[in-house]
Image: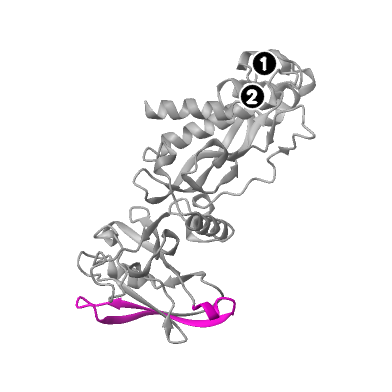
Amino acid sequence: MKWLLLLLLTDVVVQTSAKTVGQLDDDKKGCGKDKACLETLKAYRTREVLERIIEQLPGAPISDAAVQIDPELRKMYVDFYEDERHKNSDFNRQDVDTYFYSAKDPFDGEDSSQMVAMFDVTQDLEKKYEILEAKLMVSTTLPTYSRNILDDVRVQVFEKNGDNSLGELVKTQSFRITGGERITIDLPVGAAKRWFASSGSFHGIFVSAMLEQHNIAVHPQQETKDSEKMILQLSLRNKEFVGQSTNSTLRRSRRSPSAAICATSQPSEGCCLYDLIVEFNKIGWDWVIAPPRYNAFMCRGQCEKNAHHLLNDFGHARIMRAANSIYSVENMDLTSLGLCCHASDFDYLKVIYLNQQGVINVANLNGMVANRCGCS
């Protein structure tokens, strides 16, 4: 019932006028010869996208009360998403799951003298998943006199022993920092595997980032707001898939150069692929953190204009394709075939979202991006 309510509310946002769908179809002003108004098609396609998200994210929140997130923290995730989207990184692989873990204070505030960060990672993680990548996102706080100066900072990550003493040095990395910016440290995968191989083997980490005799790395014991949280990012792949193909089909697919893309300012009479920007914040879905908007694409046009190029290899369309191989296109009465212009190939979309428990999750949503159109 809650999801039904959410869809009904979403319909109100998606509606482009007070007219019913039937009225829009009957109104020839601004409509194509096939009586499919652009705004109606946009509403249909947007509704389809939202329904697919709801089907694939059963743990997503249903009210704004559950999606409070620090604006700076939101910006961090959006920036991360945009940076990774343009890289050939594990984050973009469809067979890879990404998890974000916020650091916890193992002493629950009872001992602020101990700087240590713990992460609630599922025990025995390494038994089920292969860890492909591990990164540590750390906020820094600089002395007032140094906030507008570009400083060179040497950062070291240490393991903590069971008695809270410093253990093995895990990573050393240098940064140029200005202001209280967040830095991202590439952790050795071997260390992450060791930490989460079994329960009780990980006692936390300590980050040293010394500047003018001050450690500017913010630990859980020093946080004053959510945007200062230390975050561990793990890219994981289920061991059932290890050894399987990692070719381009498992990565974000690239749009085929042969796929027709038309502009609404200069529409094609035939079946063609058009832009359709879905903006989650404008429909009230602030729990979708990244991307804040994306191009879902939609198909529109009259199949009788170019169906001989777009016939799918299904039932009715297969018969027409066979007929087309016997008779010339000029002799075929395409207007009587009853063909429909629709999306024939889809790509997935990776999203970062906030679930009902307030935990940041990453999911691969199938069928979210129309790649090409077809007629059938």
Residue at x-position 51% and y-position 71%: 180
Q: Position of residue 190 (x, y in %)?
A: 35, 72
Residue at x-position 71% and y-position 18%: 34
Q: Is residue 165 magenta?
A: yes
- Disc 2 on helix, strand or loop? helix
Q: Is residue 354 left or right of residue 80?
A: left
Mark identifier at residue 122: none
Residue indicated by mark 2: 40
Q: Is residue 174 left or right of residue 265?
A: left
- Disc 1 on helix, strand or loop? helix
Q: Is residue 173 left or right of residue 264?
A: left
Q: Quadrant of the N terminus?
A: top left
Q: Is residue 314 left or right of residue 114?
A: right
Q: Residues within 10 Å of mark 2 (few under 14, many from 20)?
A: many
Task: Specify whether residue 242 is in view.
Answer: no
Q: Is residue 116 above or below residue 272?
A: below
> Depth check: 253 or 203 in front?
203
- How many numbered markers are drawn? 2
Q: Position of residue 325 (x, y in %)?
A: 69, 25
**C-beta proximity under 8 Å, tags 1 and 2:** yes
Which amino acid does the dot numbered 2 rest on? Answer: Thr
Q: Which residues are magenta?
A: 143-171
Q: Is residue 311 magenta?
A: no
Of the numbered discs 1 and 2, the one sitting upstream in the chain is 1
Residue at x-position 45% and y-position 69%: 139
Residue at x-position 54% and y-position 29%: 47
Which amino acid does the dot numbered 1 rest on? Answer: Asp
Residue indicated by mark 1: 25
